[in-house]
Image (spheres, grey):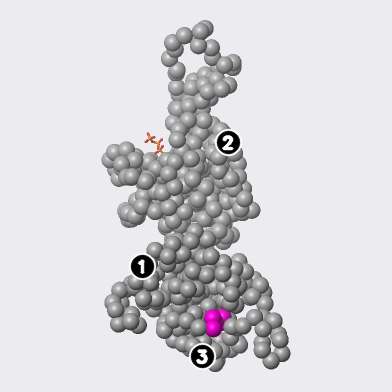
Amino acid sequence: MENLKGKRIILGITGSIAAYKAAIIVRLLIKAGAEVQVVMTPAGKEFITPVTLSSLTGKPVVSEFFTANDGTWHSHVDLGLWADAMLIAPATASTIGKMANGIADNMLITCYLSCKAPVFVAPAMDLDMFAHPSTQRNIALLLSYGNHIIEPAVGELASHLHGKGRMEEPEIIVKSLNDYFKRQESFSKKKILITAGPTYEKIDPVRFIGNYSSGKMGFALAEACAQRGAEVVLITGPVSLKTDNPRIHRIDVESAQEMHDAAISVFESVDAAILCAAVADYRPENCAEQKMKRESVGDFTLSLVRNKDIAAALGQKKRSQQILVGFALESHSGLEQALNKMQRKKLDFIVLNSLQDEGAGFKVDTNKVTILEKNGKQTEYDLKSKKEVAADILDCLAGYLL
Ligand code: CTP
């Protein structure tokens, strides 16, 4: 648990029977060297006393906006800024609903809304409450805000029913936080090059050869790298996506040649490159200077020449500590083709998506990938949003970054 050392954690405790386990969470966090500030909802105090928790953390528990006897105001804004992470364990259906919808009627929710740090939520409730569409919708909303859900376990519940809803064990909850900081730390102070989108290869001033790539996967990767603290150089072909993260330095290009030149010029300075662009393999041998006229040109044959392979060029230049990640979108014999590309382009790992899988590939918001690594490891993932796929890819990359 060495990644928790010195970390400042807000632990939010709500009104669930699992609240008694919060004491174990505090103990584990403190043992790992973290500083813990407990914030409780009024219902949370019915299940575990603030005295138990303040004795363990060495800090008064915060629960009300004001101290009753002297009117001291507890600033949820200051707390939100103080924290390196906020963990809500146990999180009841009610608290999850308030978080999802911004119902700031207690100290814990106001802290949550002010908190700039990552938020982890460990739900605890009965199985039917957890499975209810309302709870599931609220959890999906929290995920869409970038919060992390520590899925409840399947087991015996307070109602004596058996099912999914039991708060995950304290050891696993604390490990999720530790793993998060571990992943973050492998990205901070790193510079990562990402290519994204299609390239356009000019035929004449108004026509080009292109492809259906939307750039969504590459942009999701850029955002995820930046959120983990890396500096990102995003070289993108023509797309309609926006970037506003200050850690992403965006270079817009049009053709494969421009993308190649931009990538070569920054590669020297980066720790890793993720080549996500759908680079046009060919360009017209000649680009007409003026718009080609149907009447005067008539039928014609377009002569194409091969573009430079950016991935292979970077593979040639790669220093031993630089990491190169490629993509392969295949319509058939995917594994074989991807392995071949990984070797040919000197990649450390390759992300394969198959056109045969529904929900994978261009334009859509989802992807289904298999990661093939040069050590022979193969990991197949479920169909997920491109944001979640980006997180899987970065988790794999984290293992390579020194
Ligand atoms: N790639 C690249 N430059 C190119 C072509 C591809 O950098 N000119 C990168 C892609 O960004 C991707 C990987 O190489 O990471 C594989 O791309 P793909 O188009 O599947 O490979 P190709 O070598 O072009 O093979 P294919 O004949 O299957 O198109």
Q: Is residue 96 visible?
A: yes
The answer to whether any part of residue 28 appears in the image is: no
Q: Which residue is pictured at 43% across the width and 44% down the height?
A: 364
Read off the residue under disc 2.
253
The amino acid on which the numbered mark 1 sits, given as a three-letter code, is Ala
Q: Which residue is mark 1?
A: 131
Residue assigned mark 3: 49
Image side of residue 328 versus residue 12, left or right: left
Q: Is mark 1 within 8 Å of ligand 1?
A: no
Secondary structure beneath dot 3 equals loop
Q: Tell me where residue 151 appears, x and y as whole percent.
A: 39, 69
Which comes sooner in the sequence, label 1 or label 3? 3
Circle 1 SS class: helix
Ligand 1 quarter of the rendering:
top left
Q: Give the amino acid type for the residue marked by disc 3 in the picture.
A: Thr
Q: Is residue 140 magenta?
A: no
Amino acid marked by disc 2: Val
Q: Position of residue 259 (x, y in %)?
A: 54, 36
- Stretch of the chain drawn in magenta: 38-42
> Vertical placement of 122 versus 240: above or below?
below
**Secondary structure that dominates the magenta span:** strand
From mark 1 to mark 2, how far is it between C-alphas?
47 Å
Q: Is mark 3 within 8 Å of ligand 1?
A: no
Q: Residues within 10 Å of mark 1 (few under 14, many from 20)?
A: some
Mark 2 within 8 Å of ligand 1, using the beta carbon: no
